[in-house]
């Protein structure tokens, strides 16, 4: 079954689904609007801008053909590691999310003492309805795009995190999102609100999915919305380590207000095919956003990543450092846009994209874009694509280091800077992903 | 230093004095075959008949027209401006009464006057190898130095080229840019008229730049020149095209196709300085194929026009081929310069460089749109891209849309872009040295453009500086 | 992966038709001409257009985007704007089955 006929899926969301009927009126309205938008929106034409490198039809599937499935055994292992981390005080809380259906919380009660909310979205809709109604769908909604509308209509349950004004959550909150095995589909959703002068570190980990193409592909279509209110400090680490027969579409949007700072760290190692879109709007004066992305492709993996820094206010600053390592026959396409509005004065924006190609047969595409609408800016970007510097390898070899080891050292050096932005305990686990991929070189 | 600056400014301001007379005029329109507006197979047939073309060319034109009809407009770029083009309201062919001259004395007086103001005879005296001045849709004057002929160099307008060297034209016409390439290439193929045809025999070094001046001079008139340059093995040639147009009130479309072929070890440089009037759409397809160890360089200056869309392309198909694009764009009020470059590496050990400089002023918009593509077989290739944008004014806009597609591991690709405004410190320094703010700004802008201007023949550099000064006039930042 | 993989049956494709498939993570098309079956990548080397929506003309396949043509047997460019040939794959037919070999 490694041969597939490419038949066009024509999926429209039916008028009645369990998700569309759930929740208060405002939520049902939002879901219906999303359904409507999905059904009328055309599949984006292939070849146009953001769809140049991935066939949009990949993300169209008949959700009804999908039943709930089991989850990989690997999940239990990871859950146990993180539960130990919680016990040992490395993290503040752990939320597990099975296919957007079953949300379990550990450590949420402790957080509640500070007024911090960590809950399922469905429960937040009931217990924090003002917050949820105010923020949900504000950044990712029916107007964002066809596939965002699909999530908007069909998400079942998700996770809600709220940090009240002035509160610092001093350890990371860890979210563990697990996709089902073959032929499953899920629509994970996350809403985060970090109050004025509050502080939060969030680790959002996506695992699971189909392990074997012969048994079928699994799909996830996720949406993440993060609000950083005035003077807040947010760190968001997104770790994607989904299984090898998984296809993932994910849209992340964050908006930060006056004086707020945001660190976004997208790390991608998994999935057969993934299209992830990370965007931060600097919406208040003096806001500051940093992004450190890293992806490591191997086998036949295909990555299509976007980043957006949108400067919508004066004196805002942003920086992106997006690194790509590719081996085997993997393919990465990276499109990064910096946009500075006409009325956003004296902004600074930087972007760097470096691609390290480890062998013949890989493919790297990169499109670092700028749209600058006023003169009061300092803005630059750079991109490099190339193999490992032969001189560095030679230098290490000359010092008696084996070639394989030399290559490992150079790659580690390449990714090191990014991994420094990740909390300690997680960094070790990520280190093992990198090591595994470097084993066969 | 301040003396030198003063001097430069003085010379710039006197150079500018006759601008209105020089560029803002137009001659009374007196056309023989003015034709009707709009486009159909009859118009195409008429063009071909009038030119007494071979049948195969007529058929190419008809086929291209059908392709033009079937191709969509570009779905990217400035959609609003593109939407303003009304294909039915354009003249697709015109021809002045005068037939082509090979003697300057026979060129009609009013056309001479036009060229006078454009500076052509003067330029010719200095160093022209040949003049191919296109007035309206057809070349009316063409002079060629005896020694060019003696060396076997063919330098003709395209219509004559087709008549006199049909063998070569038939072999290469449309092989680099087929009609199916894009809507405007199809349009050009259907209605082309004029342009240059150059063939340089093996080993011949053309020591003087070959030049052609074009202008547009009728309301709603399209200009669709077609240029084909073939540099045979080991030859060298530099071609210069310079354009300036009188200002008219309604929109005009200019859509050229330029094909370059550099065979093994050959060298072609193609320099363009364009200053279209602000109502003109300049949608041009330029592409070069570069064979083994050959070099092609596009030196491309874009000023004026309502909308320019132009991405000179270089296809490096032979081992060791080299390509370079050096471009400058100046976007003033209501203008959009959408320019860039494409580098296709399709052979081992190829190298290329793109340098793009743009200035956006007032509400002008300059976009860099580029493609670097490295095919699997292009091992050991090197590319470097550098884009610099300067913004002048609160509503100026700059975009950078570079695409890099890398399908080979053993390559080095580097891309860098910077966007900034005129640095306050520099302004401060210069004004403290006694310069007015305007002069200081102009000096900084000229410095910014320098990597480009220094590649131009002197009188082009002077003219460019003059045009920039005009554009900068009254600028208060 | 140097083995032949069964990808389709003969009666699935008429002469002049193109069948798009995904085989071992690669997007390919099977084209049928009067001379038989040919497999090439479903990606035009010119500007990455899928070939599947193009058409077969004699022994050539024509890209739908800008009209580049490729010889189906060799993959060579027979008409611009492409400057690099399209990837081809070996095909064999046994009784009613079409097999493709991916390198
Ligand atoms: S993409 Fe196939 S001809 Fe251009």
Image: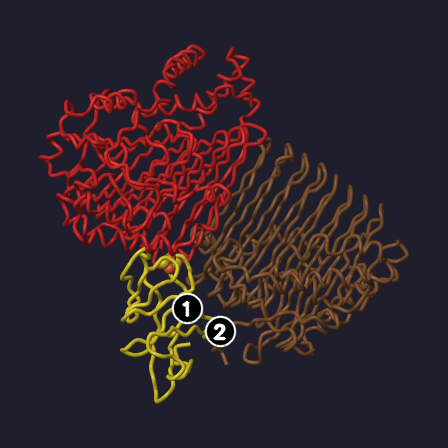
Chain colours: A brown, B red, C yellow
- Give the quarter the ligand 1 occupies: bottom left
Q: Give the labeled residue for mark 2.
A: A6
> Which quadrant would residue A153 be assigned to in this image?
bottom right
Mark 1 sits on what residue?
C52
Q: Check disc 2: other Cα within 10 Å, few if <14, some if 14-19, many if 20+.
A: few
> Mark 2 — on which chain does it sit?
A
Which residue is the extreme one toward the front? B36
**Depth order, front residue of A245/B190:** B190
Image position, residue B350 (x, y; %): 32, 49
Picture residue at 35% right of the left edge, 46% below the top: B313
Foreground: C63 or B27?
B27
Give how far across and how far down residue A397 sits, in percent: 45, 56
The image shows residue A77, relative to residue A144, as above or below, that is below
Does the image show residue C46? no
Q: Nearer the viewer, residue A146 or B269?
A: A146
Q: Nearer the viewer, residue A10 or B35?
A: B35
Quarter of the rendering containing residue B239: top left
Q: Evaluate if marks 2 and 1 touch, with contact meaning CB atoms under 8 Å apart.
A: yes
Please, which chain is the residue tagged with disc 1 on? C
**x, y percent for residue A184:** 65, 75
Q: Secondary structure at mark 1?
A: loop
Horizontally, residue A54 falls left or right of residue A105, namely left
Horizontal placement of A369 versus C2: left or right? right
Q: Which mark is residue B6?
A: none
């Amino acid at each position: 079954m490694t041969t597939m006929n490419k038949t066009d899926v024509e999926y429209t969301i039916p008028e009645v689904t369990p998700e569309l009927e759930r929740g208060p009126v405002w939520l049902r309205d939002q879901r219906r609007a999303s359904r409507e938008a999905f059904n009328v929106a055309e599949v984006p034409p292939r070849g146009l801008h953001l769809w140049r490198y991935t066939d949009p039809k990949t993300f169209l599937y008949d959700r009804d053909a999908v039943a709930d499935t089991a989850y990989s055994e690997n999940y239990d292992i990871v859950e146990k590691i993180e539960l130990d981390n919680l016990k040992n005080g490395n993290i503040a809380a752990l939320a597990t999310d099975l296919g957007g259906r079953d949300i379990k919380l550990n450590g949420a009660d402790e957080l509640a003492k500070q007024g911090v909310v960590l809950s399922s979205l469905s429960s937040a809709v009931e217990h924090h309805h003002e917050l949820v109604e105010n923020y949900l769908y504000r950044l990712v909604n029916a107007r964002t795009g066809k596939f965002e509308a699909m999530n908007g209509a069909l998400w079942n349950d998700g996770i809600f995190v709220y940090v009240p004004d002035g509160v610092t959550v001093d350890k990371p909150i860890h979210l563990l999102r697990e996709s089902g095995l073959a032929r499953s589909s899920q629509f994970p959703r996350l809403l985060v609100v970090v109050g004025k002068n509050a502080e939060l570190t969030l680790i959002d980990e996506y695992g699971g999915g189909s392990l074997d193409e012969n048994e079928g592909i699994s799909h996830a279509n996720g949406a993440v919305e993060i609000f950083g209110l005035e003077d807040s400090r947010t760190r968001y680490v997104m770790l994607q380590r989904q299984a090898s027969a998984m296809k993932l579409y994910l849209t992340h949007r964050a908006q930060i207000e006056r004086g707020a700072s945001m660190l976004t760290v997208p790390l991608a190692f998994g999935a057969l095919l993934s299209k992830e879109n990370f965007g931060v709007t600097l919406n208040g004066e003096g806001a500051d956003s940093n992004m450190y992305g890293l992806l490591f492709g191997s086998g036949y993996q295909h990555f299509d990543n976007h980043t957006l820094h949108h400067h919508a206010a004066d004196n805002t600053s942003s920086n992106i450092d997006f690194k790509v390592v590719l081996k085997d026959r993997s393919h990465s396409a990276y499109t990064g846009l910096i946009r500075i509005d006409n009325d956003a004065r004296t902004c600074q924006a930087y972007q760097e994209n470096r691609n390290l190609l480890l062998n013949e047969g890989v493919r790297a595409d990169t499109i670092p874009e700028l749209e600058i609408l006023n003169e009061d800016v300092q803005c630059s970007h750079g991109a490099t694509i190339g193999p490992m510097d032969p001189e560095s390898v030679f230098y290490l070899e000359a010092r008696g280091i084996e070639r394989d080891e030399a290559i490992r050292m150079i790659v580690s050096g390449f990714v090191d800077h990014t991994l420094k932005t990740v909390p300690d305990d997680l960094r070790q686990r990520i280190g093992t992903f990198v090591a595994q991929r470097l084993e066969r070189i | 230093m301040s003396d030198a600056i003063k001097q430069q400014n003085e010379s710039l301001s006197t150079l500018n004095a006759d601008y209105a007379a020089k560029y803002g005029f137009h001659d009374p329109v007196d056309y023989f075959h003015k034709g009707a507006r709009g486009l159909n197979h009859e118009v195409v047939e008429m063009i071909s008949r009038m030119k007494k073309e071979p049948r195969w060319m007529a058929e190419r034109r008809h086929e291209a027209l059908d392709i033009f009809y079937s191709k969509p407009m570009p779905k990217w770029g400035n959609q609003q401006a593109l939407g303003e083009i009304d294909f039915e309201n354009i003249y697709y062919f015109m021809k002045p009464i005068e037939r082509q001259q090979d003697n300057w004395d026979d060129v009609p007086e009013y056309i001479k006057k036009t060229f006078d103001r454009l500076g052509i005879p003067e330029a010719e005296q200095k160093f022209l190898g040949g003049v191919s001045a296109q007035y309206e849709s057809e070349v009316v004057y063409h002079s060629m130095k005896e020694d060019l002929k003696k060396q076997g160099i063919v330098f003709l307008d395209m219509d004559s080229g087709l008549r006199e060297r049909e063998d070569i034209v038939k072999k290469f016409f449309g092989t680099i840019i087929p009609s199916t390439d894009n809507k405007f290439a199809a349009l050009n193929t259907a209605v082309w008229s004029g342009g240059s045809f150059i063939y340089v025999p093996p080993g011949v070094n053309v020591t003087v730049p070959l030049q052609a001046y074009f202008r547009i001079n009728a309301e709603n008139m399209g200009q669709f020149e077609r240029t084909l340059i073939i540099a045979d093995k080991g030859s060298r040639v530099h071609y210069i095209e310079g354009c300036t147009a009188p200002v008219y009130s309604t929109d005009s479309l200019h859509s050229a196709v330029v094909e370059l072929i550099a065979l093994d070890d050959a060298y072609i440089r193609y320099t363009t300085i364009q200053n279209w009037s602000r109502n003109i759409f300049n949608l041009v397809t330029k592409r070069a194929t570069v064979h083994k160890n050959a070099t092609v360089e596009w030196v491309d200056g874009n000023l004026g026009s309502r909308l320019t869309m132009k991405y000179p392309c270089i296809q490096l198909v032979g081992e060791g081929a080299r390509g370079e694009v050096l471009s400058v764009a100046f976007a003033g009020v209501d203008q959009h310069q959408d320019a860039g470059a494409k580098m296709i590496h399709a052979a081992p050990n190829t190298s290329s460089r793109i340098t793009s400089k743009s200035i956006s002023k007032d509400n002008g918009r300059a976009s860099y749109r580029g493609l670097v593509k490295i095919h699997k077989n292009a091992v050991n290739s090197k590319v470097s891209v550098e884009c610099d944008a300067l913004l002048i004014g609160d509503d100026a806009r700059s975009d950078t849309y570079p695409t890099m597609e890398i399908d080979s591991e053993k390559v080095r690709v580097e891309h860098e872009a910077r966007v900034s405004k005129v640095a306050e410190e520099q302004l401060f320094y210069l004004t403290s040295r006694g310069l007015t703010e305007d002069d200081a700004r102009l000096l900084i802008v000229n410095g910014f453009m320098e990597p480009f201007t220094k590649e131009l023949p002197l009188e082009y550099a002077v003219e460019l500086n003059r045009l920039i000064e005009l554009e900068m006039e009254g600028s208060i930042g | 992966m140097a083995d032949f993989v069964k990808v389709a049956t003969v009666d699935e494709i008429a002469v002049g038709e193109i069948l798009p498939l995904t085989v071992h993570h690669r997007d390919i098309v099977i084209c049928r001409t009067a001379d038989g079956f040919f497999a090439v990548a479903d990606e035009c080397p010119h500007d990455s257009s899928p070939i599947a929506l193009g058409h077969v003309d004699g022994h050539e396949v024509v890209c739908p985007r800008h009209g580049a043509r490729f010889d189906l047997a060799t993959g060579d460019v027979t008409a611009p704007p492409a400057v690099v040939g399209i990837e081809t794959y070996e095909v064999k037919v046994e009784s009613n089955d079409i097999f493709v070999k991916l390198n």
